[in-house]
């Protein structure tokens, strides 16, 4: 059955990066022109070209050392912290056995206004970081914001990272948590008919991989709405860089490395849609949950995302393709930038119109 779009979004793309984002990036780039910053970039480029277990581990640690402190710093913004005072946090874990015995931690953020309700909408989230960095705890400030502004109970899944855990096991961590939440909806005060799954960047990949599993296992009914954003989708980064956008060319080596970190055996998994969701067959795409794809105009994943959005539209499963103009990957999550408001407003309207109703 084809989904029916309400055609909520049609942002005119502007062809230029927002001034506040461009100014911030310019100051940031100066830190990597000389000294320690320059040496760090050179080292990462070397590691990106090296295939070994030692280089994989060192590359992952460098990514974590860059991303995690930055996320922690932005998360202290008052606009985000204010919402943390309006939620109640609880935790549970979901036992799994798909890659050794492991209990996946799940952090739950319930708006104080919803604590006595028994049929809340659920927003199950996979944090960003390329599937290599960050943690569920670091994503809390943004999820408090979504919980309060959108009137949902957020389930923040602390899935395992690569290269320590390989595909499909990180996707299965999230999938098993979704199954658990749906099966225990009454205990968790959730309406099983109002469950959304979401994630950005590496979390968007986790979300899409879960959508593939749901389609393969005829379990799409578990999810009312899927919202992957700025996602790693397919092997486009392995193609010649000459035809890529500026952002895609800039990150092509690191993206290739990240896919190698994620795969247990890249050659054997090359056509596996759980590893590369963009390679999902047309038949399986027709079984995807109703989907809203969120993007930014100058993302390093814009080409592969646009291609998947077009395929999902033809398969009858795309509700909206939202592209925030002037924004770059991550800038939409910083309350200091105007694109933050545009992104969060789009998320709120999407949840109001496609999850709550």
Image: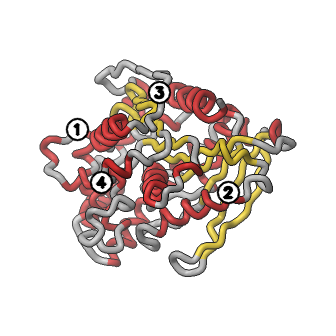
Q: Which of marks 4 and 1 is nearer the N terminus?
A: 1
Looking at the picture, does residue 65 appear above or below residue 122? below
Residue pointed to by mark 3:
5
Q: Which of marks 2 and 3 is in front?
A: 3
Q: Sequence order check: which comes first, mark 3 or mark 4? A: 3
Front residue of 194/146: it is 194
The kind of secondary structure element at disc 4 is helix
* Dot placed on the residue nearer the N-terminal end, 1 or 3: 3
Q: Which mark is residue 245?
A: 1
Q: How far apart are marks 3 and 4 (CA)?
A: 24 Å
Q: Which residue lies furthest to the bottom in this view?
A: 100
Q: Quadrant of residue 244?
A: top left
Between tags 1 and 3, which lies in front?
Answer: 3
Q: Which of 105 and 329 is in front in this view?
A: 105
Q: Name the residue under label 2.
A: 181
At label 4, counting other C-alpha atoms closer than 10 Å, the crowd grade (few under 14, some 14-19, many 20 or more) is some
Left or right of 88: which side holds 248?
Answer: left
Considering only order in the chain, which callout, 4 or 2, is on the residue closer to the N terminus?
2
Of callouts 2 and 3, the N-terminal one = 3
- Residue beneath the point at 55% across and 60% down: 174
- 27 to the left or right of 197: left
| Vertical order, 15 against 176 (above or below) | above
Tell me the element at label 1: loop
Can residue 112 be seen from the camera position used here? yes
Which residue corresponds to mark 4?
279
């Amino acid at each position: 059955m084809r989904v029916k779009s309400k055609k909520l979004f049609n942002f005119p793309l502007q062809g230029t990066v927002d001034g506040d984002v461009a100014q911030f990036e310019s100051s940031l780039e100066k830190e990597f022109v000389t000294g320690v910053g320059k040496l760090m970039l050179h080292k990462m480029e070397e590691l990106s070209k090296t295939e070994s277990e030692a280089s994989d581990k060192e590359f992952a640690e460098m990514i974590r050392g860059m991303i995690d402190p930055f996320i922690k710093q932005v998360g202290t913004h008052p606009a985000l912290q204010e919402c943390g005072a309006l939620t109640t946090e609880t935790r549970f874990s979901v036992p799994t056995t798909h890659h050794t015995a492991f209990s996946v931690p799940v952090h739950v953020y319930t708006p104080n206004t919803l604590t006595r309700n028994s049929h809340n909408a659920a927003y199950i989230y996979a944090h960003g970081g390329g599937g290599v960095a960050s943690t569920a705890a670091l994503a809390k400030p943004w999820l408090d914001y979504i919980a309060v502004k959108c009137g949902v109970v957020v389930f923040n899944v602390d899935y395992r990272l690569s290269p320590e855990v390989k595909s499909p096991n990180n996707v299965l961590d999230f999938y098993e948590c979704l199954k658990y939440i749906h099966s225990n909806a009454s205990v968790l005060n959730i309406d099983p008919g109002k469950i959304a799954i979401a994630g950005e960047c590496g979390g968007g990949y986790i979300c899409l991989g879960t959508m593939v599993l749901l389609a393969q296992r005829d379990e799409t009914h578990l999810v009312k709405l899927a919202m992957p954003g700025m996602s790693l989708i397919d092997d486009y980064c392995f193609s010649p860089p000459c035809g890529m956008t500026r952002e895609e060319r800039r990150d092509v080596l690191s993206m290739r490395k990240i896919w190698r970190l994620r795969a247990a055996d890249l050659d054997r998994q090359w056509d596996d849609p759980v590893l590369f969701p963009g390679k999902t067959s047309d038949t399986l795409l027709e079984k995807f949950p109703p989907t809203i794809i969120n993007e930014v105009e100058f993302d390093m994943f814009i080409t592969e995302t646009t291609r998947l959005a077009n395929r999902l539209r033809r398969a009858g499963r795309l509700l909206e393709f939202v592209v925030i103009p002037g924004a770059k990957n991550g800038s939409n999550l910083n309350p200091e930038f105007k694109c933050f408001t545009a992104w969060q407003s789009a998320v709120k309207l999407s949840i109001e119109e496609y999850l709550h109703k």
